[in-house]
Amino acid sequence: MGYTFDFGVVFARWPELLHGCLLTLQLSLLAIPITLGIAIICVFILQLRERISTWLIEGFVELVRNTPFLVQIFFLFFGLPSIGIRLEPNVAAVLALGLNGAAYSIEILRGGVDAISRGQIEAGFALGLHPAQIFRYIILKPALRAVYPAMTSQFIFLMLTSSITSSITARELTHVGAEIEGETFRSFEVYFTVAALYLAMSYGLSKLFAVIYRVSFAYPAAR
Amino acid sequence: MITTLGPAQFLLLAQGLAWTLALSAIGFALGGLGGLVIALARSSGLKWLEGLAAFFIEVFRGTPLLLQLFIVYYGVGLLDLSVSPWMAVSIALMLHASAFLGEIWRGSIEAIPAGQTEAALALGIHYATRMRYIILPQALKISVPATIGFLVQLVKGTSLAAIIGFTELSRTGTLLSNITYRPLLIFGIVGLAYFAVCWPLSRLGRAMERRLTPAART
């Protein structure tokens, strides 16, 4: 084979690549709170066991989980303008990532909330806690702790999924990679480097989440 | 010229769906073979082999599938072989599926009580027979729900082949949306087509999970 690899031209663009990493992290860090917020609200509503809202939330979860992210983002970005809702690429990207992540997070968080024993909640009432306090301290926090590993690997997956938003020209790492490719024609080298950066970011995030766990949930387990 | 959505357009979507299914089937079949190798390597007891398999899994789980497709697509292009996009996508999906299935199956292999391996060793049953008749049949059984779950991921993942120009369901949708100017409708239909494939699989996976863990649910 007559091909000589040249990573030099790619590494020379490191400021742009680094900037791309920051953009990807920014996109993810905007989408994660949306994901978590929707999940907490929906799981709370599910606890009310009201028929129509349960049906709606479960429908949303099934619909999102069983269709590809690419189609979802095309639907939002190319589809919605035809009914008058025009979104910036980055806004559409954050929204799509947030909604997509929410569907998975609802399932995960629901499992954690379902595992909390009723006696614990009744104890809260017996102690005269406000329902909001019960939800926050007796239901939400232990549930989040129980599902923490699944939830955070979901967040890392969200960060990896954000690469797909380059297809609607959202500014993030893969998009930056495509720009560099367009100027250097070193497709393989560019995408190899970009993939390595994603690997580094997912490794970094998993370490960060481990630290957050130690800080937030350091108290001993009940079992 | 604006094309309307007629039977011809639905035929194109059906063809796209067929390609999506074909890609998923190829990825799953080849990835299943690869995954078995990875799972066996990962639980082989040989340090270097386990490390190698663990590294393979980490790399493919820690990078986006889209980038994996790009790298394989441009990578095999460098080998001076004239490889069709079809081949490149299949190879990428195979590697991706190998890593994920390998990790799922490793977990199941390790879930089989060690006493069974010890009993087999005591009886003088060597590695291949032990795996073939004792460990793998049980391990594969517990792994069925997670495996089906991954299959759903894979079907959805094939949509990314559209980005490198492979005309499957998603790309057919993009092309049709460009000539009909009805993106909301087209992507709605495309989404529903994926849903029609993935939802029954998801339900099957969940039903299997419930059957395998009857006590955990009420």
Image (tube, rainbow, N blue to C red):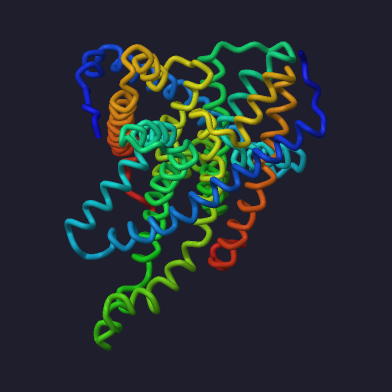
Q: Determine the residue located farthest toward the bottom in the rendered image.
A: B123
Q: Residue at x 72, y 33 (%)?
A: B189
A142 and A173: which is toward the camera: A173
Against A176, residue B46 (above or below) is below
Is B112 displayed left or right of A87 in the figure? left
Q: Is residue A205 visible?
A: no
Which quadrant holds the C terminus of chain B? bottom right
B19 and B96: which is toward the camera: B19
Q: Which residue is drawn at 61% across and 51% down?
A: B202
Which quadrant holds the N terminus of chain B? top right
Is B172 displayed left or right of A207 in the figure? right
The count of marks equals 0
> Where, by quadrant of the figure, is residue B70 drawn?
top left
- In the rendered image, residue B208, in percent from the top left (x then y), is placed at 58, 63
Is A10 displayed left or right of B83 in the figure? left
> Where, by quadrant of the figure, is residue B135 drawn?
bottom left
Q: Is residue B80 visible?
A: yes
- In the rendered image, residue B179, in percent from the top left (x then y), is placed at 71, 19
- In the rendered image, residue B41, in percent from the top left (x then y), is placed at 28, 60
Is A97 displayed left or right of B73 in the figure? right
- In the rendered image, residue B200, in percent from the top left (x then y), is placed at 67, 52
Q: Which residue is drawn at 56% across and 50% down?
A: A114
Against A96, residue B85 (above or below) is below
Q: Which residue is drawn at 53% across and 59% down?
A: B145
A116 and A29: which is toward the camera: A29
